Amino acid sequence: MNTANLQLEGLYLALAAVNRALIDAGVVSTEQLDLAFRKTEAMAMGAERMNSLSPAERDAVCFPIRVLQTALESPETADFTELARTVGMTKPRYNDQQ
C-alpha cells in the first residue's frame, strides 16, 4: 500500500478523535458537526465542479468528509477499514449514474 494512503488513514482517525473530544467536552454537538460536514460536501460538489469530475473523482473528493461523518455515527472503536467500508456501502449515486 502507498505510504501516503497510510498517512491519510492516520490523519482521518486523528481528526475523528479530535471531533469526538470536542463533542465530549461540550464544545460542539454531533448535530453541528454533521451539519458542517453536509455543508462542506455540498460546497465541494457544487454544480460547476460536479460537471467536470468523473463519479470516481467525486467520490475521492467526498471520501474524507464522509469518513469523518461516518465516524460521528460509529462507536469509538471503529477502525479505518470499517469506516471506509461503511462509506462505500452508503454513498449516494449521482444524478448522471441513475
Image (tube, rainbow, N blue to C red):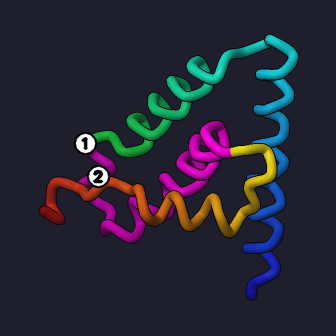
Q: In this view, does 91 lie above or below 35?
A: below
Mark 2 neighbour class, 10 Å CA radius: few under 14, some 14 to 19, many 20 or more? some
Please name the predominant secondary structure of the magenta segment in the image.
helix
Q: Name the residue under label 1.
A: 47
- Residue 35: x and y in percent read 50, 24
Q: Residue 38: x, y in percent?
A: 46, 32
Which residue is the extreme one toward the top? Answer: 26
The total number of labels drawn is 2
Q: Is mark 2 on a helix, strand or loop?
A: helix
Q: Specify the label residue 50 is tagged with.
A: 2
Residue located at (73% from left, 73% from top): 5
Q: x, y (%) of residue 14?
A: 84, 48
Q: Is residue 58 above or below residue 41?
A: below
Left or right, 58 with reference to 30 = left
Is residue 51 within the magenta segment?
Answer: yes
Asked whether the residues under the numbered discs 2 and 1 touch, taking CB atoms below 8 Å apart as contact, a structural biologist would say yes
Q: What stretch is highlighted in magenta?
A: 47-74
